[in-house]
Image (tube, rainbow, N blue to C red):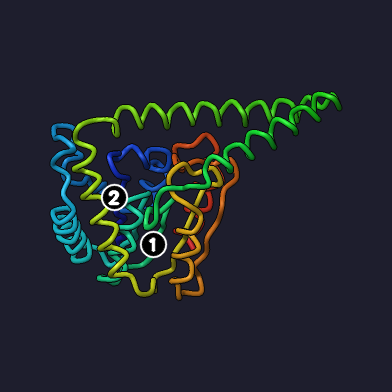
Amino acid sequence: MKKAIILLHGFLSDQSDFDPIMPDLETRYDYIERFVYPGHHDDESYENFNDEETFFRLEKCFEQLLKKYPIVDVIGYSMGGALGVYLSQKYAFRKLVLLAPANKYFNIFLPYAKLKHYARNFVSLEKAIIQKNDQDKTGYRIILSHTLEEDKESLRFLYERYLHSYFLTAFKNFRRLIKKANRELKTINNPCFIAWGEVDQLVPKKTITFLAAKCTHPDSKWCIYQHVSHLMLKSAFHQQLKSDVLIFLDA
């Protein structure tokens, strides 16, 4: 039986959000729809991002998928996660994967979580040095190095995509989109996998518990990933996350 999957990327982001998992999906699906929002194409301005147009185009695209393929799955990342939840309220499809879904946003606990993360790993590194444990020393240095690089990448993305004149207009549309997605939400009846990173810079943990409480299917689950930031699949520590997503889709 033919299968398709639709991938919904993040706000002011692009299809590359899913690059690390694409080779695995290509062996599992007959068709992969890498949906792109208005204003997010290479030849467009983010000023053209519009919540109403996004819903319209997404629904039209998804309805075409459902007509062509008996089995359809959805993976949504960040804002795309909120859109994936929205689709689950309107259409019947197989499985839903939510990666750091932005149904709630602004992680006010990030400074505390980040300091705790750095402190915990610095202390562990110091112990490994004192105990002359070369394997642990290498491991904790890798964790700290990758965490620092991901923080730099997040700041670079913030500067390149957020600190521009179009941001205010685009963000207003983002807020309206999230409000509509949450307003439509009652229960999530699909088998649903929800993932969140413990050092997510944007999405708070309460988003995960909020959505998990809406899941009614017995095969639903949610997981928190150590060392993983909002980059999720593009995080240096994405391997376990990717494996869990694939196991969920294959089951």
Image spot of residue 28 (x, y percent): 39, 52
Residue type indicated by callout 1: Leu
Q: Nearer the viewer, mark 2 or mark 1?
A: 1
Q: Sequence-wise, which precedes: disc 2 or disc 1? A: 2
Q: Is residue 208 left or right of residue 81?
A: right
Q: Which residue is mark 2?
A: 32
**Residue depicted at 18% across the width and 64% down the height:** 63
Tag 2: Cα neighbours inside 10 Å, few (<14), some, or many (≥20)?
some
Q: Nearer the viewer, residue 71 or 8?
A: 8
Q: Quadrant of residue 185?
A: bottom left
Image spot of residue 68 (x, y percent): 20, 63
**Quadrant of the frame with the N terminus:** bottom left
**Residue depicted at 46% across the width and 26% down the height:** 152
Residue contact at pointers 2 and 1, CB within 8 angstroms: no
Q: Nearer the viewer, residue 16 or 145?
A: 145
- In the rendered image of this protein, does residue 120 appear above or below residue 61? above
Residue type indicated by callout 2: Ile
Q: Is residue 71 left or right of residue 192?
A: left
Tag of residue 96: 1
Q: CA distance from mark 2 to mark 1?
A: 15 Å
Q: Secondary structure at mark 2?
A: strand
Image spot of residue 118 (x, y percent): 63, 33
